[in-house]
Image (cartoon, rainbow, N blue to C red):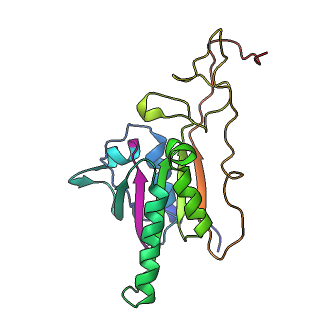
Amino acid sequence: MAYSLKENLMKEERLSGGHRMCAGCGSPIAVRTVLRALEPEDKAVVCSATSCLEVSTFMYPYTAWKDSFIHNAFENAAATISGVETAYRAMKKRGKLDETWKFIAFSGDGGTYDIGFQSLSGAMERGHDMVYVCYDNEAYMNTGIQRSSSTPRFADTTTTPQGSVIPGKMQQKKNLTTESPTRPRPRSPAISRISAKKPIRPSTPLARPS
């Protein structure tokens, strides 16, 4: 069946407007786009690692999410959603659930490439039926633009400032796909990386260190 942008745009929004994300931020746009991949009859459980997305869309007792939403710690989005998916399969096997549920996790690059990589690696190795979305800012943007392992080489951050001593971050950006388990399995989590690219404007010429 051919993809129809018009039909997808006509689907009911699953992330309500009026949340506290900044005007023009790409994160809620990415979330809305991902959620449009769901069919109207699908039910979903969404979880988000601690981030701008979480604190701006879910401030108890208010929520912008129309689907079931779980806020979890910075490092365990993949562990949380894989646990929920396992519980769903167990309940469906026992005849306690008939509906079709989807499982989606959102996390930034800090919660994916670094702090949350252990739980993501475990979920991938186990082969859960889930979608994991990394919103790749290429730095810890919510806490002051510190470098992450997703930050490109020579980028200027608060923890890798460009100057006369070093020309920015010294390491290459981690290739997330090559760091992940690759053994074929019946079910494999889908991982999507969404990046809001901005040009790197160095304060000093980019010179390879001697």
- Whether residue 41 is visible here, answered yes or no, is no
The residue sitting at the right extreme is: 210
The residue lying toward the viewer, choosing from 194 and 85, is 85
Q: Position of residue 127 (x, y in %)?
A: 60, 70
Please report the bounds of the magenta region as a residue range. 41-52
Q: Quadrant of residue 100?
A: bottom left
**Residue 84 sits in which quadrant?**
bottom left
Above or below, 173 against 129 in this view is above
Q: Is 47 included in the stretch rendered in magenta?
A: yes
Q: In the image, residue 62 lies at what x, y percent?
A: 23, 53
Residue appearing at x 66%, y 16% in the figure:
166
The x, y position of residue 69, in whole percent, is: 35, 61
Position of the N terminus, as image quadrant, is bottom right
The answer to whether residue 135 is left or right of residue 90 is: right
Q: Is residue 129 above or below residue 14?
A: below
Left or right for 61, reference 207: left
